[in-house]
Each structure stands twice: as C-alpha cells, then as structure tokens.
Image: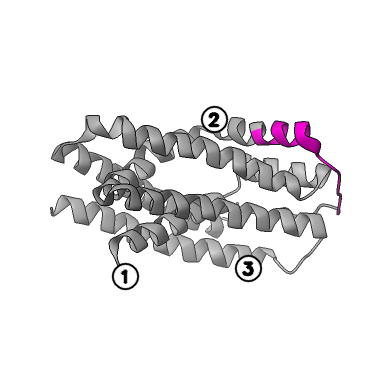
Amino acid sequence: MNETAQIFFGSLMVAFTGALMPGPMLTLVITSVAQKGFKTAVFIVIGHSVLELLIVASFYFGVLKYLDNAMAVKIISVAGGAFLIYMAVSIIVSVARKKIKLDLDSKKITQNLGTKGALVITGKGILISLANPYWYVWWMTIGAAFMVKSVQHSYGGVASFYTGHILADFIWYLFVGFLISTGRRFFNQKVYIGILISCSVFLLYLGIRFIAGFMLS
C-alpha cells in the first residue's frame, strides 16, 4: 500500500471513530432527521465538510509554513499521537463504565425541505462544529499531525487525507439518518459498542506509531 493510500485509510478510520462518539453533530443529525427527514443529515454533513475544507486549505496554504521545522513537526506529531491514545483510552473506559448509549428511538418522518430549509440546515452543520470545543482540539493536534504528514505528498496526500476524513462523516451520519428515517432496529447497542472498541484499538496503534515514528526520526 502506497503512502497516499495509507493516509486515506488512516484518516478514514480516525475520523470514523471521532464521528461515532456521541456529541453535538450526532445530536443535531438525530433531532433534525426525526423532525424533517433523511435529507437533513445530508445537508448537515455538507455544511460540516465545507468548514473542514476551509480548515484543510488554511493549513496547506498558510498555517503549515509557520510549522516548517523539525521541532514543530515533532511536537505536533507527539501531541496528535497522544490525543489519539487519549481518545482510545477514554472510549474504552466509557464503554467499560457503560456511559455510552446511542438512542435511535425515533419515528419515521419525512418533509420537503426546500432550498431555504436546505441552506439553513447546511448552516447548522457549520455552526454545530464551530460550537464544539473538541473540534478545535482535534484540528490543533490530530488534524495538524495528519496535515504535516500529508503535505509531504503534495496535493495527492492532502486530497487523500481530506477525502478519507469527510467520507467517514458521510458514512456514519447518513447511516444514522437512514436508521432513524426508516425506523430500522438491526443496528443495536452491542453492534455499536463492538465498532467503538475496534476503532479504539486502531487509534492506540496509530497514536503509538505517530509518536514513535517522529521521536525516532
């Protein structure tokens, strides 16, 4: 597997784990789909993806030039790796303490959004991200570490990172939206916890690899 493919799949798995955790975005998707139907999930993620594209562009064309030295790269990589390990451990601890529960108990509701409604929902997708402190921490640690690695492969590396990152959000949130809008119950708590644990193990591996790779370089 070449480097850009590794960046893509690494970004996909890390973002997927972050998306899985209950938070503002998940809450917005669940409540919006329950009120106005599946399409709202699509526009929420579109809004989120537009904001994240702006962040990736700002890193690529501006922010990273201030971090173009060996010490900065090591600090960012160690911080990103440490935060990945923290995420993994916190998820495992939360699962062990039975603090994580995904509530998909909503009725099937469908409404026509219209252009104005779609724009409003897209705007909510942007605002809900900006209102989440975790989002800023993620980009200053894990996101920055991935960008440092991605820019080494120019546009291809950055595109692979962004595509994997956003694809995870679309897969998860549209899946949740589908479950709610159709009233399906084949996705239960045990399946959800199993996915979380699997992703946590991957986060531990990636976090250790981030730290070890740059500390030994």
Q: Residue at x 53, y 55 (%)?
A: 168
- The first of marks 3 and 2 along the sequence is 2
The x and y percentages for residue 90 are 46, 51
Along the horizontal axis of the image, is 165 left or right of 27?
A: left
Q: Which residue is mark 1?
A: 1
User: First in sequence: mark 2 or mark 1?
Assistant: 1
Q: Which mark is residue 191?
A: 3
Q: What colouring does the structure picture have?
A: one colour
Taking the image as shown, residue 25 lies to the left or right of residue 136, namely right
Q: Which mark is residue 130?
A: 2
Callout 3: 10 Å neighbours few (<14), some, many (20+)? few
- Discs 2, 1 touching: Cβ within 8 Å: no
Q: Which mark is residue 56?
A: none
Displayed quadrant of residue 72: top left
Q: Is residue 80 left or right of residue 106?
A: left
Disc 1 marks a residue whose amino acid type is Met
Q: Amino acid at mark 2?
A: Leu
Please report contact status of discs 3 and 2: CB closer than 8 Å, yes or no: no
What is the magenta range? 108-122
The one of 7 and 115 positioned closer to us in this rendering: 115
Give the CA separation, mark 2 to mark 1.
35 Å
Q: Position of residue 196 (x, y in %)?
A: 53, 61
Is residue 80 in view from this perspective?
no
Mark 3 in CB contact with mark 1 (< 8 angstroms):
no
Residue placed most toward the observer, 157 or 88: 157
User: Which of disc 1 and disc 3 is earlier in sequence?
Assistant: 1
Quarter where residue 2 is shown:
bottom left
